């Protein structure tokens, strides 16, 4: 079935401007959402989702109370939630392979929502992008909407704070209003959020994306275990020269939106490159080609464990 807005199927919009003109309540909802205060989420209850990752869980999860992701400029944060089971999946999409990613996101929720006693519907929340000059955000917005329209399930678009509805002009430069979101798994509340702590294995996960890793499911909610990798990168990456470049050069060549990146972007890129230089062989990070697994301790930290 196509995407639904206010219980009615929608035609594929030609632009985001067209979408918001046809459905002004989406515009109103986006304005309300972007005006909410940012929430600083306690890392001890958080499962953080990096770029090209997704994670799904349910209210019965004792290890995770909040799914969250941030640092989205042209990227879009995609949340699908089932109102009956409360199962939710959060993905950080950058347009690398939208058509294959959206079915994975939907399946992650439906596979956790099979109890017939918990009737409900699938709801979609899209946040991210801004009015960038190359229209990268706009293209991703339309691609995501089209991909969700092609799913066989009824999916109800509830929040659409994307592209021009997530845009603000500061000192003559366009940038996003909302860079990050969280969802309270117990209540279903969606809110703007920032996440100073992006673990576990932040550098490794960033390296996976930096070297071309595709969208990955990182969490087993039944076991409460995060799974990273295995992935591979070339031992001959010619990237060390980036460490000596100035901030403007790194922003120009390694960002889709140089004027809108958060302040820590350059340092994040440099630390990712440093990690790859310190681990030229991915085999050293994934001995025997096995993934890394993390489980939450009683203190609330993610601990690297040996999976048996």
Image (spheres, rainbow, N blue to C red):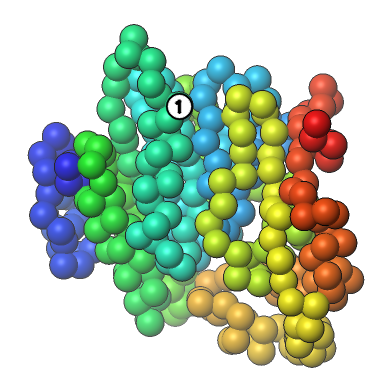
> Element under label 1?
loop
From this viewpoint, is residue 152 visible?
A: yes
In the image, residue 76 lies at what x, y percent? 44, 58
Left or right: where does residue 85 sit relative to residue 59?
Answer: left
Pick the front one: 299 or 225: 225
From this viewpoint, is residue 38 visible?
A: no
Split into 4 quadrants, where in the image is the C terminus? top right
**Quarter occupied by residue 304:** top right
Residue drawn at x 77%, y 60% is: 203
Residue drawn at x 57%, y 58% is: 51
**Tally of numbered tags:** 1
In the image, residue 83 lies at what x, y percent? 35, 24
Left or right: where does residue 40 sit relative to residue 180?
Answer: right
Split into 4 quadrants, where in the image is the N terminus? top left
Q: Residue furthest top?
A: 117
Q: Which residue is mark 1?
A: 112
In the image, residue 206 lies at what x, y percent? 69, 62
Left or right: where does residue 47 sit relative to residue 26?
Answer: right
In the image, residue 103 lies at what x, y percent? 37, 48
Q: Residue furthest front?
A: 288
- Tell me: residue 283, above or below residue 79: below
- Mark 1: few, some, or many residues within 10 Å (few <14, many ≥20)? some
Residue drawn at x 80%, y 78% is: 235
Residue drawn at x 76%, y 30% is: 296
- Tell me: residue 224, above or below residue 200: above
């Amino acid at each position: 079935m196509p995407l639904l807005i206010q219980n009615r199927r929608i035609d594929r919009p030609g632009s985001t401007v067209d979408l918001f003109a046809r459905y002004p309540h989406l515009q109103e909802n986006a304005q309300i959402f972007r005006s909410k205060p940012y929430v600083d989420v306690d890392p001890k209850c958080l499962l953080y989702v990096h770029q090209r990752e997704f994670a799904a869980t349910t209210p019965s999860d004792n290890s995770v109370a909040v799914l969250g992701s941030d640092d989205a400029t042209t990227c879009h944060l995609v949340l699908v939630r089932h109102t009956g089971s409360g199962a939710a999946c959060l993905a950080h999409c950058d347009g690398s392979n939208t058509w294959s990613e959206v079915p994975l996101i939907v399946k992650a929720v439906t596979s956790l929502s099979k109890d017939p006693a918990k009737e409900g519907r699938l709801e979609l929340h899209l946040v991210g992008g801004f009015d960038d000059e190359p229209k990268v955000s706009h293209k991703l917005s339309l691609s995501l909407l089209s991909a969700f329209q092609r799913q066989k399930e009824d999916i109800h678009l509830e929040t659409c704070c994307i592209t021009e509805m997530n845009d603000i002009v500061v000192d003559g430069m366009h940038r996003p209003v909302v860079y990050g979101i969280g969802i309270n798994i117990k209540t279903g509340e969606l809110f703007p959020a920032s996440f100073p702590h992006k673990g576990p294995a932040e550098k490794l996960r960033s390296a996976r994306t930096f070297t071309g890793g595709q969208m990955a499911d990182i969490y087993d909610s039944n076991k409460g275990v995060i799974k990273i990798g295995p992935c591979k990168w070339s031992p001959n990456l010619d990237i060390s020269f980036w460490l000596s470049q100035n901030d403007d050069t790194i922003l120009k060549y390694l960002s889709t939106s140089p004027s809108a990146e958060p302040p820590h972007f350059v340092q994040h890129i440099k630390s990712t490159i440093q990690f790859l230089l310190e681990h030229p062989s991915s085999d050293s990070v994934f001995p025997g080609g096995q993934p890394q697994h993390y489980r939450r301790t009683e203190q609330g930290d993610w601990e690297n464990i040996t999976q048996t």
